[in-house]
Amino acid sequence: MRRLGVFLWLFLILIGCEPEPKNSPLLTEIFQSAGEKIPEVVANPENYRIQIIYTQIDRKKDQSPVFTTHTFRLDTTRYFYPASTVKFPAAVLALDKLTRYASLGISKDSKVSIGTGFSGMTPVFNDSSSQSGDASIGHYIKKILVASDDDAFNRIYEFLGQEYLNERLWELGFSDVRISHRLSIPLSVEENRHTNPIQFYDDQGRRMLEQPMARSPLDLTVNADGTLLGTAYISKGERVSKPMDFSKKNFYHLAEQQRFLRQIIFPETVPKNKQLYLKKKDYEFFYQWMSTLPRKSQYPTYNDYSKYYDGYCKFFMVGDSKDQLSDHIRIFNKVGWAYGFLIDNAYIIDTLNGVEFFLSAVIYANSNDTLNDGIYDYDSIALPFLAKLGKAVYNYNLKRERSIRPDFSRFIVNK
């Protein structure tokens, strides 16, 4: 029987499908070194639905990365609501799609006008938060990366179309993802299948491209377990005393989130047939705006630090306070929060000490187990947990011996 188990393990490795990883002893050590809050929460992991992926990075002499991944309760088949984390792949695929229109003179900065044609649609003619006053795909991406703007994501969703967005992700190897709806707008399944007509214009106001309204034929039922969440939920102001059904909502599990982020940070590690149609300048654009803090952003501008503090969209390290992030630490990430779930998916570097690592985590903080009531334990449980987790993994990496110091020059983009 033991020989059969060994044979099965070897067979799974040979076909490229490793057994489900077990909890990492290293992460357990990191938890224990972190002081209060982390041990308290991980002692009840089922209650908080915690999943964590920490990927250690070492560099070879040629600076190519070597990844060593550690996980805690990772389960790619168990549903959690991904909230705003779906905005990141959508933003990336928007530039990926735009490269196909380069011969028409269209770029991320081209003026965009968005029309209507089906119920639930709203038009766009300009954007007062941009320097020119015009709407553009590039400006929407900035708003997504700096402040997680919902409307900006919805406009990117409309540019991509539901069918293209999902099929392109599947083509790239992210077969489990399902992005089926806009955010913060109560639309039906059919309304979310339809995406608006969009026009692109040059600097003289001449139309360069008209993308017609589209309807997606895809059935995007979530391929995961546990899509009935909570014991009750609020709908149209009324309490419904049964679990909320998420089977038709977005799905983007933690393993695919970190793998997609790796693809952007280290595109050279991806097989050529799975690479994006992005240029060097496109990657630099993402590196710049993924790590831009709201207080350092101009067009879009976020002057109210009491609301748009450094931890507003950087949950690891500083999410539990109004403290400013040290200038030598940069976080390239995308967060999400909704229905009691808090998620962060990040690549973190310290340019002073030569530290780098990937960290992704999700926690469910909803003690009354009622969804859509706006009463969640974000401030008391979830944010302190993620902030302390980020600090604990960072402190471990500060002490960890590394034979080759990483070169961060391509990530430090200030334009």
Image (cartoon, grey):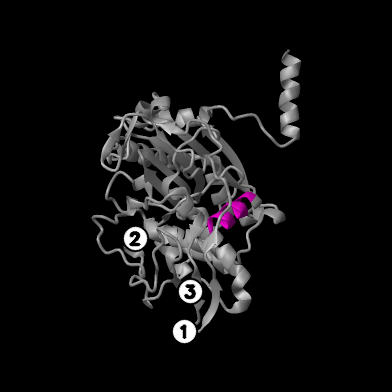
Q: Nearer the viewer, mark 2 or mark 1?
A: 1
Magenta residues, as a range?
Answer: 161-170
Residue 340 versus residue 314 in the image, above or below: above
Crowding around mark 1 (Cα neighbors within 10 Å: few <14, some 14 to 19, many 20+) is few
Image mark for residue 205: 1
Crowding around mark 2 (Cα neighbors within 10 Å: few <14, some 14 to 19, many 20+) is many
Residue 106 versus residue 142 in the image, above or below: below
Task: Report if the CB atoms under discs 1 and 3 are less than 8 Å apart.
Answer: no
Q: Earlier in the sequence, mark 1 or mark 3?
A: 3
Residue that numbered label 3 is attached to: 109
Kind of residue at disc 1: Gly
Query: Horizontally, is 196 left or right of 235 in the view?
Result: right
Name the foreground residue: 244 vs 202: 244
Query: Horizontally, is 191 left or right of 8 in the view?
Result: left
Kind of residue at disc 3: Asp
Crowding around mark 3 (Cα neighbors within 10 Å: few <14, some 14 to 19, many 20+) is some
Name the foreground residue: 136 vs 158: 158
State how far apart marks 1 and 3 are (Cα).
13 Å
State how far apart marks 2 and 1 are (Cα).
31 Å
Residue depicted at 33% across the width and 52% down the height? 312
Report the quarter where the C terminus lies: bottom left
Kind of residue at disc 2: Pro
Residue 50 in sight: no
Secondary structure of the residue carrying tag 1 is loop
Residue 163, magenta (yes or no) = yes
